Image (cartoon, rainbow, N blue to C red):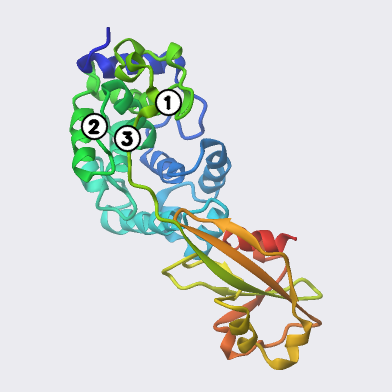
Amino acid sequence: MTTTKSFGDTVVDWQKKHGRHDLPWQNTQDPYAVWLSEIMLQQTQVVTVRDYFGRFITRFPTVADLAAAHQDEVLGLWSGLGYYSRARNMHRAAQDVAALHGGVFPRDSETLQTLPGIGRSTAAAVASMCFGEPIAILDGNVKRVLTRYLGFKQDLASSKMEKKLWAIAQTMLPQRDVANAMPRYTQGVMDLGATVCTPKKPQCVQCPVAGACVAKAEGQPEAYPVKTRKLKRTSEQLWLLHAVTHQGDVWLMQRPQTGVWAGLYSLPAFESFDALLAALPVKYHGQLQERAVFKHVLTHKDLHLHPVELTLSSALKLGAAMGEGQWVAKADWPSLGLPAPIRKILAR
C-alpha cells in the first residue's frame, strides 16, 4: 500500500515505464525549453502546444534570441494560442534573464519567481526538472491527483486551503536519490494527471497509487478537487470595421497595451454601430455591409462580434477618428500578432 512518504518514489518508478516520453520539450534539462513549454501549457492542451513550441524554438533557439526580438514578432508567432499576456510576460522575462542574470536562468525556484509571468508552480517545475530542486508543483493536473489521493475535501477556492495543500505536496516528494529523481517525479505527477487521473472517467485501474487513494476507496474520484468559486461571466458587443481594398490590403490598428487583446493588431473596434459610423466620413456609409454576428469566448467574457465590411478601390486615409492605424498588405497580415477572431474574419 502506497503511503504519503513513498508516493513520490512510486510516481518516479511509474513514470519510467508508463509516463510520456515523446513530447518535444522532454528529455532535456535546458531551462529555456522547459520554461517555454510550461508557459505555453498554461490553460492550453498539449496537442495545440506542440506546433507552437516547435516554431518558437526554431525562430528563437535561445533565451537571448527571444530577448532580442521585437514584441510584434513574438505576438505574431504566438497568434492563435490565446491568453496573450503569457506571451508579453514571456518576452519580458527573457529580457530580464538577459539583462539581470547574464543570459542564464536562475537555478532556484525562489529567484525564478521574480521573473515576469512565472508563478510558484512554474518556477518549481523549472527548478525541479532542470536543477533537481526538491520543490513541489501544483498545477491543475497535480491538484486533481493529490486531492483525490489524499481525500482532500477542503475548498481550493480558499487561498488558505490551497496553501495547506502546497505544504502537504512538499511532503510527498521522492525520498530516494532526490536530486536525480525530481525531474522524473515532476514530469510523472503531471503525466498521471494528464493521462490517468483525468477530470472525467479516471483510469483508476492503471494508477500506480490507486491502492492508497481515498477518492477511489470512496468510489467518487470526480468529486475532487473541491472548488466552489465560479467565474462570473460577462458579455460585450463589439462592432469591427473590416476596411479592405480590392488588392486585399486591410486597415489594422494596434490595441493598447492593457485590456482585451492588449498589444495585438486588430480591426478597429467600436462599442456600437453608431460609434463606427461617427468614425467614418459620411461618403462611405452607403458602402458598409454588415456580416453575420458571431461569439468569441474568453475566460471571463463572451464577445459578440459584429463585422462590418467596407471595400475600397484603393488605400485611402480613413481619418483621425479611426485612431492610429495602417494599411497592411494581404501577404503581410498573417505574420502579425492577431486575435483569433480577427484572423478568422481576415481569412474569409
- Residue at screen point 35% across, 23% down: 184
Circle 2 sits on which residue? 133
Circle nearer the N terminus (1, 2): 2
Q: Position of residue 91 (x, y in %)?
A: 41, 57
Three-letter amino acid code of the residue under disc 3: Val
Circle 1 sits on which residue? 191
Counting labels gives 3
Picture quadrant of residue 128 = top left
**Distance between the alpha carbons at the discs numbered 1 and 2:** 19 Å
Three-letter amino acid code of the residue under disc 2: Glu
The crowd level at tag 1 (other Cα within 10 Å; few <14, some 14-19, many 20+) is many
Disc 3 secondary structure class: loop
Circle nearer the N terminus (3, 1): 1
- In the image, 20 versus 347, the foreground residue is 347
Left/right placement of residue 226 relative to residue 325 reads left
Circle nearer the N terminus (2, 3): 2
**Distance between the alpha carbons at the discs numbered 3 and 1:** 21 Å
Q: Nearer the viewer, mark 2 or mark 3?
A: 3
